[in-house]
Image: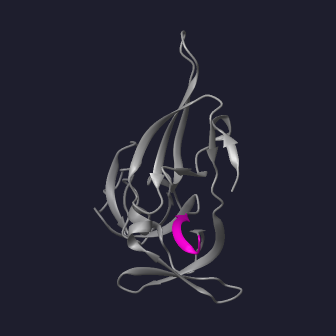
Amino acid sequence: MGMISTAQLKKGMYIIFHDEPNMVVDTTFVSPGKGSAFYRIKLKSLFGGRVVDYTYKSGEKVEEVLVETHEAEYSYFDGSNYVFIEPRTYEQYSVSADVLGEDKQYLKEGLLYRIKFYEETPVGVTLPKSIVCKVIETENSVKGDTATNALKPAMTDTGAKVLVPLFVKVGDEIMVSTETGGYLSRK
């Protein structure tokens, strides 16, 4: 752990805020016409999950937290935790549903995910940019529904609800962005 300047803060970094580790969710530099420049930082607590906004003066020092990362495949849900297995060592990591939050809808068996640990406790999971899902429920398409940009709701095999073009039907495999939750393409 070392001290860094507020100018070095970036989204996804981890710092100590009020004696507790937090992840930087967003950072904005503000340079008003009068007065000194400052940074508006949005922080998410690693343990409580609460999000706070804080303003740092430009050049102020903060303590960076080192977070360890392990790559592991998603295996199964045991009722309260999501279990990941590291493919090389077969070590199992249990991540609570609270840590995953809404990201659980992008978990697929066999896919690799990056699990972040702070002092050997899982504090986050980094998702791939996109995943391939199978459409299990959607309205039937009507012949000729390919000319417009109209969208319809669809449910995927992972539980994600996605707006898809009218030509997508049940059984199709689609690419879904894990960042926006939007439809990218049909496979």
Residue at 34% across / 55% down in the picture?
143
Tell me if residue 16 can be seen: yes
Is 77 placed above or below 10 here?
below
User: Where on the picture, by quarter, is residue 80?
Assistant: bottom left
Residue at 36% across / 50% down in the picture?
145
Residue 122 colored in magenta in the image = yes
- Specify the principal SS of the magenta part: strand
Q: Position of residue 134 (x, y in %)?
A: 44, 71
Q: Position of residue 99 (x, y in %)?
A: 44, 67
Q: Position of residue 11 (x, y in %)?
A: 58, 46
Q: Nearer the viewer, residue 117 or 97?
A: 117
Q: Magenta region: which residues? A: 119-126
Is 84 placed above or below 13 here?
below
Tell me if residue 157 can be seen: no
Is 125 placed above or below 1 here?
below
Q: Nearer the viewer, residue 148 or 163?
A: 163
Q: Nearer the viewer, residue 44 or 109?
A: 44
What count of labels does the image hold? 0
Residue at 68% across / 39% down in the picture?
8
Residue 83 colored in magenta in the image = no
- Tell me the quarter of the image containing the N terminus: bottom right
- Tell me the quarter of the image containing the C terminus: bottom right
**Which residue sits furthest front?**
19
User: Where on the picture, by quarter, is residue 117?
Assistant: bottom right
Residue at 40% across / 42% down in the picture?
149
